[in-house]
Structure formats: structure tokens, C-alpha cells
Amino acid sequence: MGNPGVGKSTILNALGGNFPNGFSKVSGLTKDVSNHLVTVNTGKGQIPLQLFDVPGIDDCPSENGEDPIVKYLQMLQTTLNSGGDFVIIFVLKPSSGRVSPSDFLVMKTVLDSLKKAPKVGWILTRAGRDEMEDYLSPEYGAFLAQILDRIVKNKNRKILPAPHPLVLAKHNASKGFSDEDKCFILNYVLSFKPEPCESLNMVEQVVRGFLDMAKLTLF
């Protein structure tokens, strides 16, 4: 999950999904939650994966006067409460090393709503050649983890992302990732243990999140 246009669908397609992907001038291409069942080879055998592609928070159309943010959060909460074991991956696109407040708001809202969840992961996308070394450094991972630690409730800190994210270089969305990057993505996803999820009061969490973000200096 993540904000529009960060490459969520392309990452899922690298795992064998068949989701619409590409570039839109005004938003991402995913408008509703969609899913595909795929089979991946782990090197020790094949396992099934149910991939969920969740739209960005700005991609949910407003219908009948419904607040699009409320619609998005309800959609997300329904998916997380649909049963089964989950791996949750946040996809972010930093700009000059900075992660936007809206990205952190999405993560905080989701993390604070979770009553049961696996340890979550994060993927940084579209890194330039001159940025890769910085993003891969322990210092940068610790910087991101420290910010999340400041804004997430104490009881949910155990599920915060590991301090070392997966970093992916810029790629052509229409062509997808290289075989090497596909291996990196698969190995990263498989490094997490799927566990049951339970999400409550996500809409209420986002209101608190806006207040917290107003107090937080990110840069």
C-alpha cells in the first residue's frame, strides 16, 4: 500500500500479478482493491500468494457526497479484516531523500489501527543512481524508522518496519523490473512471516494522525 503513482502495481506484477500499471498525470491507475492468486517458486518449492493491490489515498473517487478519504480507509480496513494471513508492505517514493508527510500519515493511520498484524515492510522506489547509496545506508534506514517510532502508538511499535527497506532504482513502468530486481522483490516479500490481521477504527485514527503530523517536524 502507498500513495498514488509510487509503483505498487508494478511491484506486484514483478511477483506474477496482472495489475494495470503505468503513469497517469493526475493520479495512479488503481481505483479499487483488486487481487490475483499467483504461485511463486521459493527455491524450496512452490507456494501460493494472494496479491492485493490497494489504491492510493487520492485515487478513490467520491460518490454520492462520500468523503474519498473515508471511502479509502473503509476499503482498506475491509481488506485487512477479510481473513487469512497477511504480509503488509508500504511502498514509498522519496524526493531528495525526504518522505512526504502524506506517506507517513498513511503508515501511521494503518499501523495505529492494527490490533493484530505481522511485522510490516517498506519498499523505496524510483531511486536515482546518485541516491541508491544513501538510501541503502544504515543511517538512512534508522532515520526513517526513528520518525515512525515517534508517531506510532507504543503498543504497535513491535510491528514497525525493519530499519533496512528494500530500495529499487528507477525503472520503465511499461517494461517492468529487471529479472534481478524481481528476485530482490520476491526475496524481500518472502522474508516476512504472514500473520492474521485485525484493523479497527481506521477513520478515527486518521483524524488523530492529522493532529500528530501537524506537530511533527520531518525535515
Image (tube, rainbow, N blue to C red):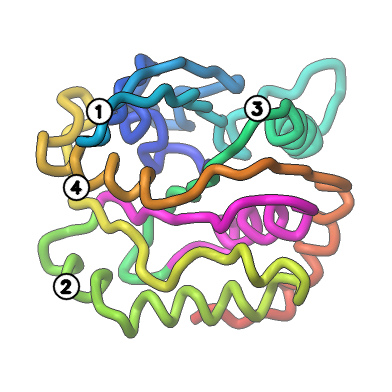
**Dots 2, 4 in contact, CB < 8 A:** no
Instruction: Give the Cα separation between the discs numbered 1 and 2.
Output: 30 Å
Would you name the residue on which mark 1 appears?
41
Instruction: Give the Cα separation between the discs numbered 3 and 4.
Output: 26 Å
Of badges 1 and 4, the one in the foreground is 1
Of badges 2 and 3, the one in the foreground is 2
Q: Residues within 10 Å of mark 2 (few under 14, many from 20)?
A: few
Of badges 3 and 1, the one in the foreground is 1
Q: Secondary structure at mark 2?
A: helix
Query: Tag on residue 60?
Result: 3
Query: Tag on residue 170?
Result: 4
Q: Is residue 92 magenta?
A: no
Query: Residue 79, position in %: x, y?
Result: 69, 29
* x 35%, y 56%: residue: 124
Query: In screen coordinates, is 187 left or right of 35?
Result: left
* x 58%, y 62%: residue: 104
**Depicted 176 relative to depicted 63: above or below:** below
Query: Residue 215, position in %: x, y?
Result: 73, 80
Instruction: Give the Cα separation between the discs numbered 2 and 3.
Output: 35 Å
Q: Secondary structure at mark 4?
A: loop
Of badges 2 and 4, the one in the foreground is 2
Name the image quarter holding residue 138: bottom left
Instruction: Give the Cα separation between the discs numbered 3 and 1.
Output: 34 Å
Q: Earlier in the sequence, mark 3 or mark 1?
A: 1
Query: Tag on residue 133?
Result: 2
Please, what is the three-letter code of the amino acid marked with disc 4?
Lys
* x 45%, y 23%: residue: 29
